[in-house]
Amino acid sequence: MKIKFEVKKIKDIRAEVVTSVTFEDSSDQKLQWLNTLYKGSLEPLMETKDFKGSVNQTIVTYVGGETKSKRLQVLGLGNSKEISLEKLRIAYASASKKLNALKLTSVAFEIPDLSFIKSIINHSHSDILQAICEGVFLSQYTTKKYVSKNDFAPFDEIVFFTDSPKYTKEAADAVKNTRIISDAVLMARELENEPSNMLTPEKFAEFVKKSSVKAGYNVTVFDEKKIYQLNMGGVINVSKGSNNPPRFLILQYFGSNKSEKPYVLVGKGVTFDSGGISLKPAQGMEAMKMDMGGAAAVVGAFEAVSKLKLRVNLIGLIPAVENMPSGTAYKPGDVIKSYSGITIEIDNTDAEGRVILADALDYAANYKPKAVIDICTLTGAAIICFGHLLAGLMGNDSELKKKIFNAGEKTYERVWEMPLYDDYDKLMKSDVAEIKNTGPSRQAGTIMGGIFLKKFTGDKYPWAHLDIASVGFNVAESITEYQTPGATGYGVRLFVELLKNLSH
């Protein structure tokens, strides 16, 4: 896909279709201006008053005269006083999908008056431009990789344009950087949507190692022999029921002085989760290929951070396993020993994500990190709590949690904090080990996941936990115009925004 930014008048833009934008409260004036420019081509549209400029409203018309494009799409942004970054993303994505349906390959999108929008929403020009570009780029994705007759074709060329040279440098940089971030999100979606027979732990590790070479970060992969040598009991035991052996990935990016302590991202990498001996119901189990959404988010973050060359040191830790039932699988009632030496009573083998994360969180302490953030599709209870709109946030450092919250608000990958009171600890108490891997049935399930992980972080470093089971994949009612059914790639944009702020 070719991406360009141009400072040109709308009639000089060369594309199969040009999209012009207007607010609802100024749509009459904008249509009159366009009608004059296009020699009366919009008069029927103006007479019918079918287009009002309401939010996400689009209409395509054909224009003549001395113009490079013969199609004009007009996009409504709604009331100017109600605009937001997310509404911009959705509006431009809506316009993009309308053009995808027309099978157009070369498209152009007008950038509106940035100063006017900034005065309303108090975000930088770069933030506004990024939201616009994200709406277009993130909509260009299909899950039909394995369909021979795919009826969706992404654009071959996208042009963003303005007739004002005032923000040329900001716009050019925003287009380039947003392309990098959006490509990383789409990579994460692609990994999450990949069928588990195509993406075993070993194949996942191979993909990341290969991709890292081009992106500019380093990857070390521990095989099962090394994992056994390190006594990573969580990873070892969860993977025992599968014929596909585990992998433990270490991603490294040094964008700052190597003496500077790194941030660590930890991602749950369960490439398929049957529930193990505590078998899940058949209905919905096919979605458990996406139980490595946390791992995909970490990989996506590294892809973007490396290509953006952020001035930050970053470590990624990904335990990758399959959780399957067999004669060799770990069982309810088993007691296992984690990498830290803490013993765990397995109450339910379907609470496997926290068990493998326990090893990774303790391993993270080896890097003496500034902070550690884990991200995982951990608990179905998060869906009960939040629906499919928010991720659960927990942790031991208020400043870190605040920064994550702010990054989530800006990217619309939103989070909401849940408590980790010590009072909950007793609910995870075991009679035969130091901790159980689940609490009482139907009680504070999402919090119980955080309480378990807290046992392995202690006060060793500032830590935050993101439970993204509620937002890692889409259901019909939660799909926005820049998403598709299936994986969301949640966490990539949040991490990039967070790390960009931390690098300052």
Image (cartoon, grey):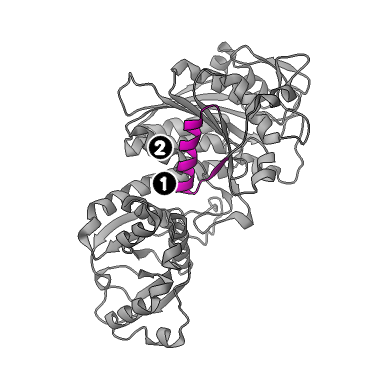
Q: Quadrant of residue 350?
A: top right
Q: Is residue 69 above or below residue 124?
A: below
Residue 161 x/y as whole percent: 29, 62
What residue did someone put label 1 on? 183
83, 92: nearer the viewer: 83
From which residue to which does the magenta span run?
396-416
Q: Residue at x 66, y 36 (%)?
A: 379
9 left or right, relative to 151: left
Task: Look at label 1 and name its amino acid.
Answer: Asp
Q: Quadrant of the N terminus?
A: bottom left
Residue 346 x/y as whole percent: 73, 22
Label 2–label 1 contact, CB within 8 A: yes
In 3D space, how far apart are the residues under numbered discs 2 and 1 (Cα atoms)? Answer: 9 Å
Q: Quadrant of residue 476?
A: bottom right
What residue did someone put label 2 on? 303
> Does residue 181 belong to the magenta stretch?
no
294 left or right, relative to 334: left
Q: Residue at x 40, y 37 (%)?
A: 303
Task: Look at label 2 and name its amino acid.
Answer: Glu
Crowdedness near tag 1: few (<14), some (14–19) or many (≥20) residues, C-alpha within 10 Å: some
Residue 434 x/y as whole percent: 70, 15
- Give the secondary structure at mark 1: helix
